[in-house]
Structure formats: structure tokens, C-alpha cells
Image (cartoon, rainbow, N blue to C red):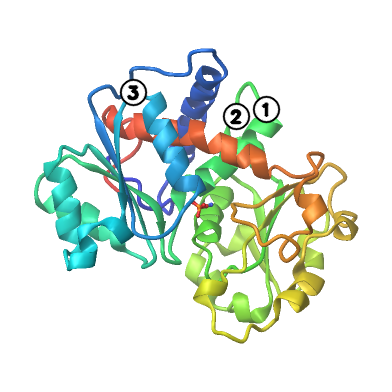
Amino acid sequence: RHHILSLADFTPEEYNTVLQTAASFKEVLSRRTKKVPSLQGQVVTNLFFEPSTRTRSSFEIAAKRLSADILNFAASSSSLTKGETILDTAKTYLALGTDIMVIRHRESGVPQAIAAEMDRLGKRVGVLNAGDGQHEHPSQALLDLFTICTLLNPDAPKCELLAGKKIAIVGDILHSRVARSNIWSLTASGAEVHLAAPPTLLPPEFAQYVGSAERLKIHWEIEPALDKADFVMTLRLQKERMSQHLLPSLREYHQLFGMTRDRLRLCQPDVKILHPGPVNRGVEISSDLMDDPAFSLISEQVTSGVAVRMALLYLMGSSSKIGGTG
Ligand code: CP
């Protein structure tokens, strides 16, 4: 596949290709010299129309470790401010020699629209969705999968390791592109996925929308989702996408759905907690739990992001090692 826009049609074989490639780059990153020449001469452009810390920086370091040249676009200091369109911006970076575009936008569908335009022009540019609106964030879900599978088997991370594992996804599911991508990857890997959120942040039609109901359960309380859970993914309350008066309020949310030390008792004794970041400390997870390495995989997720994004750029940059054109 020369674009990575969604995980909806990813196969277990493709997940395993990404996991195995990321595992070999993780080994490279543990060496003294962390750089390989795989993408020498290729240009990777970070087109971020919405703020980011982790995704943007880890794509940048991943591209540098692969010896690619990297261009970083920032909307606020670009000619977008003079009225240039998104498509003309993308075509400008194409004319500058871009081979892979990594795109984030606050609206769903922007990376897909740019990919379609590149295809229409007959250009072999790879487009990678780095988070579009409330739609998907494929590289985040892939690094979450890598983090979990590496914990289960550091030598051979494979998606089948998730078969029968219970994974709770708790928080603002309504606005979460991370949840949507994770639902695809985790259910395809054989995990049982339990979503928990207040009704205002998890509309009942969500199960239908996802269309993978058998391995997907919906709860309006946190307790059944945490019951004997192997992994708990906490999600940020996306205040910027909500109306001014939150229901529940942040304090009420923490009381009802916050991941706390007390609530760990409901889960498996060796449960691990994930969060894609950025975190509202003391809202979706208590501050001390977030920093407790016995339970928290949050730093590990950020570190995994580099190896996984190296794998994605490598696989996109060196012909069609994964899938079709989606
Ligand atoms: N998880 C994530 O997408 O974080 P950033 O917004 O910092 O990139």
C-alpha cells in the first residue's frame, strides 16, 4: 500500500509485517549508531495543520534515523495564512520533491483528499494519516499494538498474542480518532475490546458505526470494562472539541471514569495502563498512577513510536511491502 490512511482494511499479515519491521528498527535504535541508510535521498514532509508534540517529533526523528531528508511545515508560519489552499500546499511540497507526506488536520478526510489528488496526478507519493479529525490515527494504534505485543513477547511481537486478551478503552470515545483506529487493530488481532464512557461521550450507535460488534462491548460505567482487564487504554477528554459546559465536568469525570489506584483492583493483577497523550493529569488518570512504571506504559508508547514510524516510512518508501492502495 503506498498510502496509510486507515486501519479498517488492514490484515493480520500487514499488522505482523509492521510489528516485525518495527522490532528490527527497535534493535537498530538500541545500537550506538542508530542510523541506517534505508531512505537516503528520499524526502519526507511533515504537513501538520493541527498541533502535535509526539507524532510530529517522532516522525521527524524516525525519518532522520532512516537517513531521509525531512521538511517540516507549520500552518501558522506558512502561505496558508495568505490564502493558499491545502491542495496547493500539498502540490507545492510535491514540486519540492516530497516522496512521503505525513499529514495531520483537525478535519476528518484531509489526508484522504490529498492522497486522491496525488493519485489523480499520477504521482507515486505516499500519504500517511497522522490524525484526521475524529476519524483515525493509524500510526498511534500501530505503536499501541507494538507496545502491547512487545510486552507479551519481546523477541517476536505478533498480533495473535492479543487473542482472548481483554482491553478496556475508557474516556472521550466520541471525539477519539485513536479509539477508532485501535478498535480496528485490536479486534482484528483477536482481543475483546470494552469501551467505557459517559453517554455524552459514547453514543449508542457507535457499535453500529464500528461494525465489529462481536468483539466490541459498550459500557456507560467503567467497572464492567475494567473487570479482569489485561490492558486499559485511557483517553484524553478533548475539551477543544466540546461545548463550553462539559457534562460530566472534569471533576465528575474523574470521579466516575478516572483511572485510579483504587480501580486497579478490578483489573488483572498485572494490568498495564496506556494513554496516547497528551494527558490531562488527574482527570482521565491519577497523576501518581501515570508515573508508576509498574503499571504505566505511557513513556514506553512514546519510545515505541519511533521504531513503529521508522517501520511505516520504510515500508512505504521501499515499494509495496504492505497491502494495496488504501
Ligand atoms: N498521541 C498524539 O497524537 O499526540 P500528539 O498530539 O502530541 O502528536
Q: Residue at x 86, y 54 (%)?
A: 264
CB contact under 8 Å: marks 1 and 3:
no
What's the distance in space between the residues labelled 3 and 2, CA to CA?
Answer: 26 Å
Q: Residues within 10 Å of mark 3 (few under 14, many from 20)?
A: some
Residue 176 in the image, given as x and y percentages of width and height: 53, 64
Q: Residues within 10 Å of mark 1 (few under 14, many from 20)?
A: few
Q: Circle 3 sits on which residue?
A: 67
Q: Earlier in the sequence, mark 1 or mark 3?
A: 3
Residue 135 in the image, given as x and y percentages of width and height: 43, 63
Q: Is mark 1 within 8 Å of ligand 1?
A: no
Of residues 316 and 53, the one nearer the viewer is 53
Total labels drawn: 3
CB contact under 8 Å: marks 2 and 1:
yes
Q: Which amino acid does the dot numbered 3 rest on?
A: Ser
Q: Circle 1 sits on which residue?
A: 153
What's the distance in space between the residues labelled 2 and 1, CA to CA?
Answer: 5 Å
Q: Earlier in the sequence, mark 3 or mark 2?
A: 3
Q: Residue at x 39, y 60 (%)?
A: 50
The reply to whether residue 85 is visible in this rendering is yes
Q: Residue at x 62, y 81 (%)?
A: 200
Q: Which amino acid does the dot numbered 2 rest on?
A: Pro
What's the distance in space between the residues labelled 1 and 3, CA to CA?
Answer: 29 Å
Quick check: 18 left or right of 280? left
Any mark on residue 249, and which? none
Q: Circle 2 sits on which residue?
A: 157
Secondary element at image label 3: loop
- Which residue ends up furthest to the bottom in the rendered image? 245
Q: Quadrant of residue 126?
A: top left
Q: Which amino acid does the dot numbered 1 rest on?
A: Asn
The reply to whether residue 163 is visible in this rendering is no
